[in-house]
Amino acid sequence: MAEAWFEELAELVAIPSVSADPAHSDDVGRAAEWLAEFVRGAGGSAEVVPTETQPLILGDLPASNGSGGQSLGPVPTVLVYGHVDVQPPDPLELWESDPFTLEERDGWLYGRGVADDKGQLYLLVKAAAELAAAGELPVNVRVACDAEEETGGHQIVDFLAADERGADAAVIFDSGMTTRGMPEFSVATRGLAYYHLVLRTGTRDLHSGLFGGAALNALHALNGLLDKVLARDGVLPEPLRAGIAPPTDEEVAGWGELVPGKELLREAGARQAYDRAAEEFYLRTTAEPALEVNGIAGGSPVLQKTVLPVSAEANLSIRLAPGQDVDAIGAALEQLLREAAPEGAELELTRLSSSAPGLVPPDSAPVQLGLDAFEKTFGRRPLLVRSGGTLPIVPALVEKGIPTIITGFALPESNIHSPNERLLAEYVPLGLETARELFRSLAGLGG
């Protein structure tokens, strides 16, 4: 791989910055310092700021005046966000190459974080650095990145709330496109509330021959309780649907240009949850709330053990649709669960993390300028769609009145959060060209 960017990106990917694993705390710090040093090397200032959880990376790369010096007049400020932490690479045996060694095979770049989000963040900061080196950076670039997006991402939210400087626009490369060559801008993100639930029905496990059929079984009770909050034909109970902001006609029309849900489910090796799930794929995954049970524990699913479990636990999460309120939906969920608990059972429910959904005004000047920039490099105007994922920074930016462009270069087959994560190699030079054009376009916002 002869491209000049490969070695730099390989350095960043090589750092195993797994924020969910305390054993990699130092590595998370190294990844943060790598980004700060990159901004400094481009002629800007940057620092790694410790927090109660993981560090923030804050920096500024000032606009050029066209001759290699600093800009003398007022110019727009563009906030660049991304995250340097990554998901755990497990299971390692399913990787075809070392997860922390950037490798090119058959037109793809492989490595943990190459798509989510180290590789995509790199496109933005590298493009800004190239423009600055040429004395052609037309905007002030404010770097505000974190190292905990994969485990909550609330330090950057707190920082933005306290930061009085603001920005004229924000740019986030941390998503993708469902069809190769057809870029997308996310105009909404779903929220997330994650819970741990413990259900107790007695003081100790019981002999199933002596007590089975008469005593409460915690696993039975847990399954019945969860059944009360799960969707029917894709639709959650009404209390969990309050506040949904319906998609616009333009968004719904855009779904028709995306990869059909049936194909996405097939490529993922998934089975549809109900008869119309494939047909309603984008409605259910981007514009509606969805509750999922992420794990259940209790009794012994491995050993032959004839006991009646009196303790069971589960992790469950609910993705909130744009327009919904985290606290209101959380309260409704807790009420439904408590009402469903059988008499005599003790329910303990703990919210582990949460983030609000975000709605981005699609007619804002930065979004429209961004659409123009992408059209120049891709040859087609991006679709305006909703994202099914959660980015805690998006509602924070909306709250601050900072119009935001949310886009990216990952594809459905990029294996994000899975073994063999990958990014199409040709999208690196194209992404750099697009990011440069984006910075040039956003100069049109004025100071």
Image: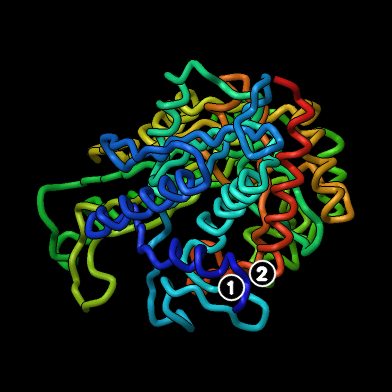
| Residue 207 drawn at (x, y percent) | 13, 65
Taking 130 as reference, is 66 above or below it? above
Read off the residue under disc 1: 109
Q: Residue at x 61, y 77 (%)?
A: 2
Taking 52 as reference, is 160 above or below it? above
Query: How many numbered callouts?
Result: 2
Marks 2 and 1: in contact by CB < 8 Å? yes
Residue 237 visible in the snapshot: no
Depth check, front residue: 380 or 342: 380
Left or right: residue 37 compared with residue 44: left
Depth check, front residue: 180 or 103: 103
- The amino acid type, in three-letter code, at marker 2 is Leu
Read off the residue under disc 2: 424
Element type where label 2 sits in the image: strand
Q: CA distance from mark 1 to mark 2?
A: 6 Å
Quarter-of-image position of residue 335: top left
| Residue 165 drawn at (x, y percent) | 52, 18
- The amino acid type, in three-letter code, at marker 1 is Leu
Pick whichever of labels 1 and 2 is earlier in the sequence: 1
Q: Residue at x 74, y 54 (%)?
A: 433
Q: Residue at x 32, y 44 (%)?
A: 196
Left or right: residue 427 compared with residue 210: right
Q: Residues within 10 Å of mark 2 (few under 14, many from 20)?
A: many
Left or right: residue 241 compared with residue 356: right
Depth check, front residue: 322 or 226: 322
Element type where label 1 sits in the image: strand
Depth check, front residue: 262 or 347: 262
| Residue 387 drawn at (x, y percent) | 65, 45
| Quarter placement of the N terminus | bottom right
